[in-house]
Image: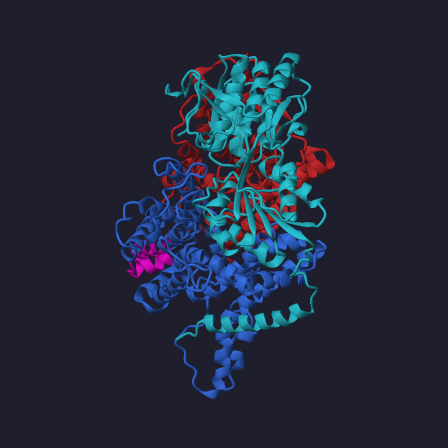
Chain colours: A red, B cyan, C blue
Amino acid sequence: MTEADLGLWAIPVAILGGAIRVSTPFLFVSLGEVLTERSGRINLGLEGTLVFGAMAGYALAYETGSPWIGVLAAAFAGSLFGLFHGLICSLPRVNDIAIGIALMLLGMGLAFFFGKPYIQPVAPDLPSIGFGGWSDLPQVQAALRVNVLFLIGIAAAIALWWMFRATRIGLLIRVVGDSTDAARAMGLRPAVIRTLATAAGGAFAGVGGAYLSLFYPGSWNEGISSGQGLMAVALVIFARWNPLACFWAAILFGGAGALGPALQSVGVSEGYYLFYAAPYVLTLGVLIVTSSPTRAMTGAPGELSITK
Amino acid sequence: MTITPFSRRGFLKGGAALAGASALGTLPSLAQADSHGLTVGFIYVGPKDDFGYNQAHAEGAAAVKMMDGVTVVEEENVAETVDVQKSMESMISFDSAALLFPTSFGYFDPHILEVAPKYPDVRFQHAAGLWSADKHPMNVGSYFGYIGLGQYLNGIVAGHMSKSKKLGFVAAKPIPQVLQNINSYLLGARQVDPTITCQVIFTGEWSLAVKEAEATNALADAGCDVITCHVDGPKVVMETAAGRGAYVCGYHANQSPLAPEKYLTGAEWNWPGVYTRMVQTVLDGGTIDNFDRGGLAEGYIKMSPLGSAVTDAARAQFEATKAEMLKGNFAAYKGPLKDNAGNTILGAGDSLVETDISLESMDYLVEGVIGSTS
Amino acid sequence: MADQNPSRGGEKILSPDGWLAALAQRSEAVVLPMGALLAGLAAFGLFLLILGKSPADFYALVYKAGFGTAFSWQNTLSRTAPLLFAALCVALPARLGLVVIGGEGAIVLGGVACGALAGSVSGLPGPLAIPLLALAGALVAGLWIGAVGALRHYRGVNETIASLLMAYIAIALMNHLVEGPFRDPASLNKPSTAPLAAHLRIGDIPGWDVHWGLVVGILSCVVAWVLMERTTWGFAARIAGGNIRAAQVQGLPVGRLILGFTALGGAFAGIAGVFEVAAVHGSANASLASGYGYTGILVAFLARHNPLAIIPVAILLAGFEASSGLLQRRMDLPDATVLVLQGFVFVTILLSETLYGRLRIFSPARWRTNQ
């Protein structure tokens, strides 16, 4: 397969390809976090859930030969972490930010611990669909080879958006997230709803992790994540807790991640570490611009501890 | 005035320590290992089964385990900090290790150099350290293989198999060993076709899966159709490159199980022979050389079997060049040679043999490599 | 979270009938964390049991490799110093209710500053140059974490996320500087800054295999404790930590407190980086980022952000880390085992927070004999 020389056009093609490839974990984790935060809880442990999901997904996919069983396993494992987080945070006087950090460390530790035998074996990959058939250029075809999970993520984003906007369940979650008192007045049990939302959020994060190990980069090792779980939490604030905006934000961050290697491939190689820092700088910049010291951010759930 | 928890905590901890001490007396003595004969310690900076650098060393350790009268202890994922110093000392104190192989480059200075003088009866063997008699203790030795020769052979096969005449190289950091590999790869390919180029992308880390995958994709996007790498664990590069339809050449260890149809050949370390020889020297009461190097001829490196896709012409040139190398003193770098910024490296008629020490401080990329060292 | 000790302090109970009540009240702050620690260790022991490994063997090895021999003690103590500083970087802002977890970045930048400037001060005598380097490292790191505080105060940016992002950025910056502008051309295969001149190196405590960072670290904890418990700044910070808005309304200089405490926490972490360069590595390179910052988070929480408690807790956790090698070799456990253990302990400590003020056994009213 001969590749045509695209010259400088290689950069936007690479960024497009990177945006699609790299954004999927961001998308899933941020959707999960939207669900959790809309119910009034913040889960910073998603980085650990992501890594554990990656390991669990890879392990089960290898053992059973089916990547989809791996994805389900990752979702299940993620929901367990989320459930754990939710239950602990329901107790009085527990600092949910600290618990998030603790579960992040525990999740990573358990993932590395159980994942040792799976560093070498090769697990089956998740399938992908090629949307680039219209182009003769192999690069474009490769960039538009979209993984099925990416499509599922888009569907999930739309579904969540719709859920919050127009369904009863969405309304219940929003009420619990905006005001615990109002929720109780309505006869709801905020702790239960929050815990379930956190569990579901964890499941999403687990799936995001499975994507990393079962598709891109497609292997399990201890360096599989570079902070995606944490950036996704910041992404949620950037997206103003709107699932559709999460999709665009994820694409943006995915593209930023592809910047470094793309630039090197066209000859810009000065300071490549700084380009690799681009996603973090972008995330920080986004946080700075969208935060405010005095007003609660528009759209922020009232009960969320970091915005009170 | 609140009494701080500190004093109480200290007291309670002391009590716990006393209890622990008495408990230890009744437990099976796990604390002291049985050592029959020689205990050899191996320390890895990453996982032993990374399909790459550490796995190659672990394979060497596995060969040593089979020797009579030798016990092997291993530790993985030891960071290049005080951690490795303490790991070494722990192996010496608790396991009575007399021969240590701390295998990562970064362990040499200052860590091995700090620990070695304290244990003059223990021998420290380091891969790729630049040991010199006037600076370093005598119970330290360094060894390495001329794996650049292997990349040269990779390049020959790649030169035949590439249709786009563009090769790709995913590199970790622009240090001499890596630069030598990149240059050798291209020079090998240019024996086949002098117009071939090689694109290099630096990931900046010895092991970072996401960056390696991105770099491989960027290379494939740029048109490279035979890709190799120098990172600690080549698994991701191999799988991603093969997934993009490119051929791959392996490095460190044999990655052909990862991409059987696309794997051409690979430059591998051959540590089992080297390590068993060194351990046998110690068992026989001798001293290992302080500065030990070897190439293909001496069995320090080896090549993976050629893959099924390799053409006959490639095979023939590969075998012919390999036969040349087996005679020893092969010169991959022959003048006239320029770097990719236009400076002259070697004049016409000059050459650098594999044993030339200046190769170990290489800081340039030869003409034909697209990319820069900084 | 500000110190949750329900003891109101200053309550002196002098009469003999009341000493039991006083003991009950004050011991809560010790017994609960100790109990939580033991619960965490027990839970981890159960985890091992389920996996078919012996908890008794495990803890015996931890003891042996961490505290059992003179070598073990030196191993543990040499790992303690950076943890002390890293924990202060978490504990000081925690007084204000801020959760800052970016100490890793501060350590790294402090080390880079030291490595980069060592050449410029090499003409000066050691006793002058070393404190200057330490100051430089502390300054750079202090500015870094202080920036996190500033972002929190002036822009309302969540400091936990911001500090961790800044840590990633700091590591990228360090890599760039150490391999680029600050690189020593002679450092071929391991890009580093130029090696420190011999008189700038910090040595070991005489007779031990442990460098002076341990002593400076312990002193720093004492200084931090004095600051937090004995100065008006510390007292004001404690009030602000309870409720920042209320403190602002009351006229406390919340902005200055936030900037001050975060910068000071960062400065301490920067000193850890300076010691890593001057006492361990001899130059600044990628090995500076080796996870001390993250373990420091656990130390701080386990010590409930009390700087004096940080000292024994750091020693304990350093002991766990010191035992990792022997655990790998004897019990065939992966190196991540200690990480899992730390995770268990972290979770149980945080869980124990919920029990404060709720267990009647600690309530002074239960023990008072004079009603």
Q: Residue at x 63, y 34 (%)?
A: B270
Quadrant for the C terminus of chain B, please: top left
- Give the farthest residue toward the left: C124
Asked if the stretch drawn in magenta spans residue B277, the answer is no
Quadrant for the N terminus of chain B, please: bottom left
x and y, in percent, of residue B260 in the image? 68, 24
Vertical comparison of B318 with A254: above or below = above
Q: What span is in magenta?
A: C242-266
Residue in front for this viewpoint, C52 or C265:
C52
x and y, in percent, of residue B227 in the image? 56, 23
Query: How many numbered discs?
Result: 0
Residue in front for this viewpoint, B209 or B359:
B359
Tell whether C55 sits left or right of A11: right
Residue in front for this viewpoint, C233 or B14:
B14
- Residue A287 figure quarter: top left
x and y, in percent, of residue B74 in the image? 62, 48
Tell whether A63 sits left or right of C353: right
Vertical comparison of A214 with C144: above or below = above
Residue in front for this viewpoint, B351 or B192:
B351
Name the magenta segment's main secondary structure. helix
x and y, in percent, of residue B179 in the image? 47, 28
